[in-house]
Amino acid sequence: MSGDGSHVLLGNGPASRSGGGEKGLALADGARVGVIGGGPAGSLFAYFVCRLAAAVDLDIAVDIYEPRPFAHSGPAGCNHCGGIVSESLVQLLATEGINLPSTVVQRGIECYVLHTDVGNVRVEAPSQEKRIAAVFRGNGPRESRPVDVAGFDRFLLDLSSSVGATTVRKLVNGIAWHGDRLQVSTPDGWAGTYDLIAVAVGVNSHTLQIFRDVAPDYAAPGALRTFICEFDLGEESVRELLGDSMHVFLLDIPRLEFAALIPKAAVVTLCMIGEDLDEALVDRFLASPDVAGCFPGSVVPRPACHCFPRINIRPAVRPYADRLVWIGDSGVARLYKDGIGSAYRTAKAAAKTAVFNGISARDFEQHFWPECRALIVDNATANVIFGAMTLIQRMRFLRRGVLRMTAKEQGGTDTDRPMSSVLWDVFTGSAPYREILLRTLHPRFPATLAWNVVVGNLAPHGKAVRVED
C-alpha cells in the first residue's frame, strides 16, 4: 500500500473541481488514497478507511505522508500540544478497538486544582474516576535523541500501519490535477497520484497554502496564537508538587483567557491562551505567586522548551471538494478543548463517507459536513461559556462566589455537584458545550451561585484553601 513510485510531470487538469461536484465519484478496487499529515486526524482517518474498506471487501491502498517518525524526543518529535485526552474520548476509542497502552499515557489525571487570587480549591473527578489522561503528542521536550516509549501520535501512526496503511516519510509541497485524479509532489521529485486525498495538517503548517489552485473554494481556518512550554522537573518533584492534579488558573491578568499546568511523568506542560499572547503576558503570568507556588522552592525554573503555536478557533470554509477532504485542525475543530476528539469525529465521518457514499464534493457535503456543522454549532455555545468564564476571571466578587460554591460541594457528601461538574467539563473538554450550558440553566444552579456570591462576599476574605499537600 505504498506510493506507486511514478515520477511523472504534474498534469494540467482542471483548475478546480470544488464547485458543484461531479456525480458518480467513488472508491473502487485498486483505488489509491493519500493522507497528508500523520497526526491524530490523519492516522485515525487511515485506520478507519482501511478497516471500513476491508469490511466491504474493497481493495484500496492508503499512503500517509508524514516526514516525522516521532521516534525522537526534542524538536524532532515535537507536535505543539499540551496533550490531554478526555475519558469520553478514551471510551470512544475503546469502542473502536483502540486501547491506549500505559506506555503512551504519561499520567492519569484524577483531579484539578483551581487557583484564584481569592483562594484555591481541589476538585475531584466526577464519580472518583480518572477522567483524563496526560500524553505527549510527540515524545517530549528533552534534547533530540531516540526514544523507546512511543508518544500518542506515533502510537496512532503505528496503529494505522497495523491495518494496512503505509507511511511515506516525505513532506508534501505540491498538489495538482493529473488527468481526473490528484497528484502530490515532494521536494525530492517524488509524485504520487490518488483517487482521494485527505488533508490532516495543522494550522501551523504551510502545506495548507498549496491547495489554492486545486480547491479555490477552500479557505483555511482562523487561528489564535497560544503558548506551550515544558518544565523538566524530574518524576519525584512532579509527583510531590503536582501529583495527579491538573492545575488551572483563573487570575485577573489582562489578555489572559486560560492557563493550566499539566503534570506528566517527569515533565510539567504549561498551556496558555490569551489575546495577542506574547512574551510579556507569559512573563507576567509566571511572575504570579500562585503560579510560582507550584514549582520547587516557589521559583519557576527555566523551561526545557517553548513555542507559540496557533490553534483552530474558526472553521475552514468548505473543507471538501471532489476527491478532497480536510479533517482535524485543517477543517473544523472543537474550540479550545479536545482537539483530538474533534480529529476523531471528523476523521471517522470522512472515512465513512468515502467508503459508503462516495468521494465527490456533493457526497462530502451530504454525509461529512453534518458532523462538522455539529461542532460549529457547539462552538457557538462555547463562546457563551468562555465569555462567562472571562467575566468571572475579571470580577473578584464572582470569583469568591464560584470558589465558595465549589469548595462547599467538594467538602460535602452530596453527589450532586453542579459547579464542580461544570468547571471540570469546561477545563477538560469532557462534555459537549451545549450539555454544559444546559446544566447551568437549571434553576437550582444560578440560585445557588447567587447565594454563594452574596455569602462569599459578606464573609471575611481569608483564603479558604482546600488543597491537599
Image: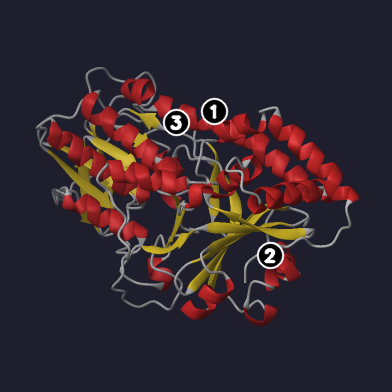
Judge left or right: residue 373 versus residue 464: left
Local SS, label 3: helix
Of the numbered discs in the image, which one, if any, rests on residue 327? none
Judge left or right: residue 63 versus residue 124: left
Residue at (72%, 67%) from the top-left corner?
290
Answer yes or no: is residue 216 visible: yes
Spatial distance from mark 3 to mark 2, Cα to Cα? Answer: 33 Å
Q: Which residue is mark 2?
A: 282
Q: Which residue is mark 3?
A: 372
Answer yes or no: is residue 304 visible: no
Please tell me whether residue 358 is drawn above or below residue 168 in the rendered image.
above
Please tell me whether residue 53 is drawn above or below residue 464 in the rendered image.
above
Residue at (53%, 72%) from the top-left corner?
305
Crowding at mark 2 (Cα within 10 Å: few <14, some 14-19, many 20+): some
Does the residue at mark 3 contact the one at mark 2 (Cβ under 8 Å)? no
Viewer-proximal residue among 227 and 84: 84
Q: Which residue is mark 1?
A: 377
What's the coloring here?
Answer: secondary structure
